Amino acid sequence: MAGTLNHAMSDAAKHEQRLAAAAVHTLTASGVVWAFLALIAAVRADWPMMFAWLGVALIVDGVDGPLARKVGIARVLPGWNGEILDLVVDYLTYAFIPAYAALSAGLFPDNFGLVGAAIICLSSAGFFAKRDQKSADNYFIGFPAVWNLVLFYWMVFDSGPELVMASTVALGLLTFFPILFIHPVRVSRFRNISLAVTAISFVLALITVVQDLAPPEWVRIGLAAALVYLLGVSLWRTLLGAAK
């Protein structure tokens, strides 16, 4: 009798684990919905709403990984690959939709829109196909195809077509070079500072979206300072690795 009861309890626990794992996969998959809503907003040239939906997708991307590790998703549902699912969503929200938006908004120089969008799409596909995306200490190896953030800065700071094109070419090339870029959550060194900078940046970005991408000057200064910090740490880590 006791053995039967223990077996039933074990089956119930496994069922709960499978449900929890399936819920995490569903959360990850919801990114395609936020991507679709962002695309609709981009087609309508409603850039603040586009960034709002991309922001939701970014939040989901930030929380689904820790949740997956907590429930042991690979062990509980071995027939489903959450990493591939995550890459599908990331390509849409980090690269494909930003490429379309940059082209549609006319950010590239005349007659170079398709070239710029193609660089974004192709270089991002190359990054997501890499097996060695991260270093041992969790820095991205090469520009990590976060074109959603690049597009945000282009629009908020009214970058001219020449700067947009030059930075597109530069970042596209850096995708394939051993330049390290910080992952503000996964990198342990400076993590507290990086998390604080990320949290503040999120608040500033939210203010910017509410202000129709025309925020007060102090918000723009804060966003610029956050970018300088993230790029500064990335450059420091790259030079440190080169010096070894």
Image (cartoon, grey):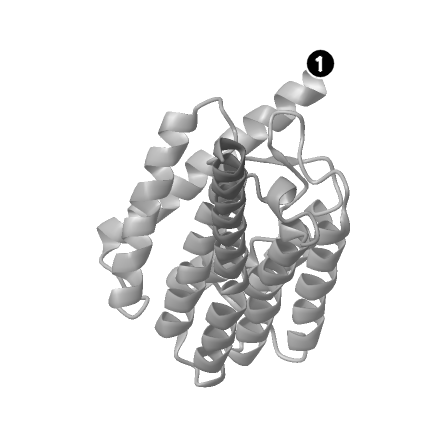
Q: Where is residue 220 shown, x and y percent of the image?
A: 31, 52
- Residue most toward the bottom? 44
Question: Could you tell me residue 182's position as x and y percent?
Answer: 54, 35
Q: Quadrant of the C terminus?
A: top right
Task: Please determine whether, in this image, residue 175 is positioned above or below residue 243.
Answer: below
The residue positioned 49% from the left and 24% from the top of the image is 188
Which of the 4 image quadrants contains residue 140? Answer: top right
Give the x, y percent position of residue 133.
Answer: 70, 40
Amino acid type at circle 1 is: Lys
Left or right of 150 in this view: 243: right
Question: Residue at the location (63% across, 58% down)?
Answer: 85
Up-down: is 186 above or below 111? Answer: above
Residue 115 horizontal side relative to residue 91, left or right? right
Residue 225 seen in the current view: no
Return the residue nearer the eye: 11 or 152: 11
* Residue 91 visible in image: yes
| Mark 1 lies on residue | 244
Which residue, as the protein is rendered here, is positioned at the far top? 244
Number of numbered labels in the structure image: 1
Can you tell which quarter of the image residue 48 is in?
bottom left
